[in-house]
Image (cartoon, helix red, strand yellow):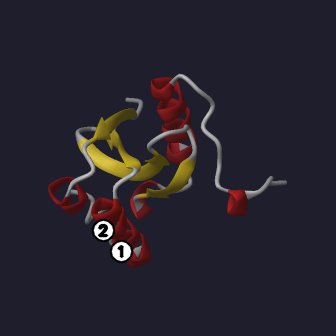
Amino acid sequence: MPISAESHPLSPEQAATFDQVLRDDPQYRKKLDAAVAAGGKRLFAAHFNGKRVAVALVEEDRPELDWVVVHPATRGRGVGKDFLRLIGQQLGAILAMPRECGPTR
């Protein structure tokens, strides 16, 4: 079964639903909380078998990724790549990566 991507409201209630995805990445939990407080971002979730397996924040006014985290149990399986592709499809644009990502070899 492929993953699906869904946009969610950027709210404290939604942020709390990503605790399992972010359990090994507490710095991103803090970034998510800061984004909820500041606004200006769009929240996306990747779902697989009814569970959230990844989270991403995208700039509200342009198709630019702020950050993405994939659940530790699903890393290395192409989930992140498929998730970013699905977000781009929903936005109707190629999703720009943050500068710190740079080209990969």
Tell me which residue sits at (43%, 51%) in the image: 56
Task: Give the percent coordinates (x, y) of residue 73.
Answer: 41, 60
Q: Secondary structure at mark 1?
A: helix
Nearer to the camera, 40 or 31:
40
In the figure, residue 24 lies in which quadrant? bottom left
Q: Residues within 10 Å of mark 1 (few under 14, many from 20)?
A: few
Q: Given the current orientation, which residue lies at the most extreme right position?
A: 105
**Quadrant occupied by the C terminus:** bottom right
Q: Amino acid at mark 1?
A: Lys
Q: Is residue 24 visible?
A: no
Nearer to the camera, 52 or 75:
52
Task: Give the percent coordinates (x, y) of residue 8.
Answer: 27, 41
Task: Give the percent coordinates (x, y) of residue 57.
Answer: 44, 51
Q: Is residue 83 visible?
A: yes
In the rendered image, which residue does mark 1 sit on? 30
Tell me which residue sits at (40%, 34%) in the image: 3
- Give the label on residue 33, or none: 2
Separation of disc 2 and disc 1 at Cα? 5 Å
Q: Secondary structure at mark 2?
A: helix
In the picture, measured across the screen, residue 105 lies left or right of residue 31, that is right
**Up-down: is 19 above or below 54?**
below
**Up-down: is 31 above or below 47?**
below
Labelled pair 2, 1 in contact (Cβ < 8 Å): yes
Q: Amino acid at mark 2?
A: Asp
Tell me which residue sits at (54%, 38%) in the image: 62
